[in-house]
Image (cartoon, grey):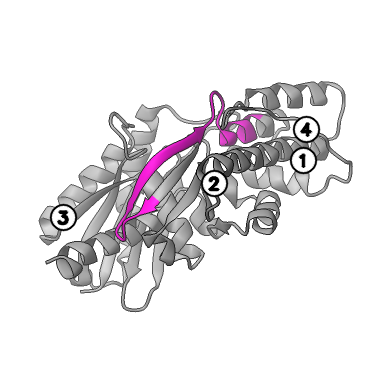
Amino acid sequence: MSLFLGIDTSNYTTSTALYDSETGEMLQRKQLLPVREGQLGLRQSDAVFHHTAQLHRLFSELVKDVDTTRIAAIGASVRPRPMEGSYMPCFTVGENTAKILSSALKIPLFPFSHQEGHIAAALFSAGRTDLFDKRFLAFHVSGGTTEAVIADGKGCGFDLEPAAKTLDLNAGQAVDRVGLMLGLRFPCGMELERLALQNTESIRVHPKLKGCDCCLSGVENLCQRLIGEGRSKSYVAAFCLEYIRQTLALMTDAIMERHGKMTAVYAGGVMSDSIIKNSFTEKYNAVFAEPVFSSDNAAGIACLCFRKYQYVHTDHK
């Protein structure tokens, strides 16, 4: 048996993945949750409903041409972060489905956090699985999280120590709120980036930190003011992304000054932005997930499932 199933039911995406440990191939099937035009997101009750409606179909598509007897284990996201009290109802859909499949197929189930899945997906897609056994800095930057952790790789997972966070708005929230101001459709990241790349004007931003932590609510107010002043959509989009880019750079510098130099890994939907990726790759020689592995996905969970299975059933009998 060589297939490992990952399930992730986050606040915005239903996702399934199969990792083939013999070929190294990752097969994904995922779908965004439907959000009405003009809305910034979903209530948890609506997210649970849509995951329930979507997950069985995505799983059916995933295994359509697969011999399911080759699935050796299942991994599922069961909470947002690997810490006490971390909970969101939407993850119960994937967790309960994984429990049913585990019982029906008589194979083990390994629980992980959504954040661990993001980090693992970045390492997998960037070809940096060596970091599963090393200490590194990991940023998880999305609509629901803006956080940096010191990750201590344990081979089959990580010990994560909080290093910095946002004190108010998440980066992905700022992107979506500014995007909606500009008439873009939620989620706004890709369209905002396309607008920003059209800008030819110079931009000055002055973000500040509190220790290593950031505050991002100011960028929403500043962009609203720029729109009121009649600045172009491309300028406002570029201003928003530059503010976030410089904020994350300041956080990275502050954390490394406090904890020492180490490899920096950037994961989460906001980190699929090419402007930030190109800048940080040059400045920090940073590790980024490929865009298809940046946004919420089950691929990292499938990868962790494989490594956990190896640890339990092979390396540590």
Residue 291 position, x and y percent, is: 56, 57
- Residue 59 visible in the snapshot: no
Is residue 168 magenta-colored? yes
- Whether residue 40 is in magenta: the answer is no
The amino acid at mark 3 is Ser
Where 23 sits versus 246, above or below? below
**From where the camera sits, is residue 222 visible?**
yes
Q: Is residue 28 left or right of residue 188?
A: left
User: Is residue 181 or residue 200 the one in the foreground?
Assistant: 200
Residue picked out by circle 2: 269
Counting residues from the start of the chain, the first of labels 3 and 2 encountered is: 3
Q: Amino acid at mark 2?
A: Gly
Q: Which residue is mark 4?
A: 205
Chain-order first, disc 4 or disc 2:
4
**Disc sitting over residue 238 in the figure:** 1
CB under 8 Å between callouts 1 and 3?
no
Front of the two marks 4 and 3: 4
Q: Which circle's residue, 1 or 3, is located before the other in the chain?
A: 3
Range shown magenta = 152-177
CA distance separating discs 4 and 3: 51 Å
Q: Which mark is residue 102?
A: 3
Residue 305 location in percent, x, y? 28, 59
The amino acid type of the residue labelled 1 equals: Ala
